[in-house]
Amino acid sequence: QVTLKESGPGILQPSQTLSLTCTFSGFSLSTYGMGVGWIRQPSGKGLEWLANIWWDDDKYYNPSLKNRLTISKDTSNNQAFLKITNVDTADTATYYCARILMATAYWYFDFWGPGTMVTVSS
Amino acid sequence: DTVLTQSPALAVSPGERVTISCRASESVSTGMHWYQQKPGQQPKLLIYGASNLESGVPARFSGSGSGTDFTLTIDPVEADDTATYFCQQSWNDLTFGSGTKLEIK
């Protein structure tokens, strides 16, 4: 059974660095074709993809946020991480991690965590 | 960026057939996927690769299309299908549509 769960600080101040952890079970990030992605959603709004990390440690970032994002993983502990530097109120959102499955020429998110709410406020 | 355009909202009655569209600003081949999100919940995968039904998803849901025009069909619609439906492409980086809010009358 695949499960994922996000954890984060809940609230932080502008200009700080947001650190998020995704703890998962039921799969391994060392398995060929597996990946974990981060997606966020401001309250009442749509979904915004942030970053992916793959089994081979390859990383992909949303080009519009790339200079503020760092994704990493700890395969032995079944965790993935995302850091966002220099946050401001526009980063207030629910942050999701999700497992990625790769199939031929595309990939998609097949399991999602319940999300963690992050508020940026002074 | 590949922009995905969805109509904002639809309202249908139980038992009817509903089609939700997603248009891409450039071709994404069959790299289109559909998710259902109910209020207060995380998104759930319904369709991947434009037309493949995810395991455990009722056969009332189906997907079609390729290139730039895609459709998610629910037939027949049930009251529990009240949700927002997002399309997502992974052919050119990754982008999501803005979502279609489906109301069951």
Image: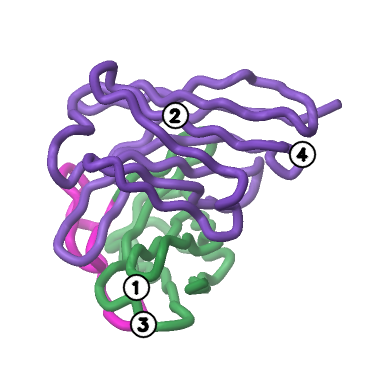
> Which amino acid, by three-letter code, is at mark 4?
Asp
Q: Is residue A46 left or right of residue A75?
A: right
**From the viewer's perspective, is residue A117 above or below residue B35?**
above
Q: Secondary structure at mark 3?
A: loop
Residue at 55% across, 43% down: A69
Q: Residue A53: percent from the left, percent from the top?
A: 34, 42
Disc 2 chain ID:
A
**Amino acid type for the residue under numbered disc 3:** Ser
Q: Which residue is mark 1?
A: B71
Residue highlighted by disc 3: B27
Q: Which chain is green?
A: B
- Residue closer to the observer: A46 or B15: A46
Residue that label 2 marks: A81
Residue in the picture at 44% in, 78% down: B23
Closer to us: A73 or A107: A73
**Residue A78 lies in quadrant:** top left
| As drawn, B58 above or below B99 | above
Question: Sequence-wise, which precedes: disc 1 or disc 3?
Answer: 3
Query: How far from the left and from the top, in percent, is residue B15?
Result: 33, 59
Q: Is residue B67 above or below residue A45?
A: below
Corner quadrant of residue A18: top right
Q: For the residues marked 3 and 2, what is the alpha-carbon distance in whole angstroms?
A: 32 Å
The answer to whether marks 4 and 1 sit on the same chain is: no
Label 1 chain ID: B
Using a 10 Å C-alpha cutoff, classify the residue at mark 1 as few (fewer than 14 neighbours), some (14 to 19) or many (20 or more).
many
Residue occupying image coordinates x 60% and y 50%: A67
Residue carrying label 4: A88
Q: Which residues are magenta?
A: B46-70
Q: Is residue B5 magenta?
A: no
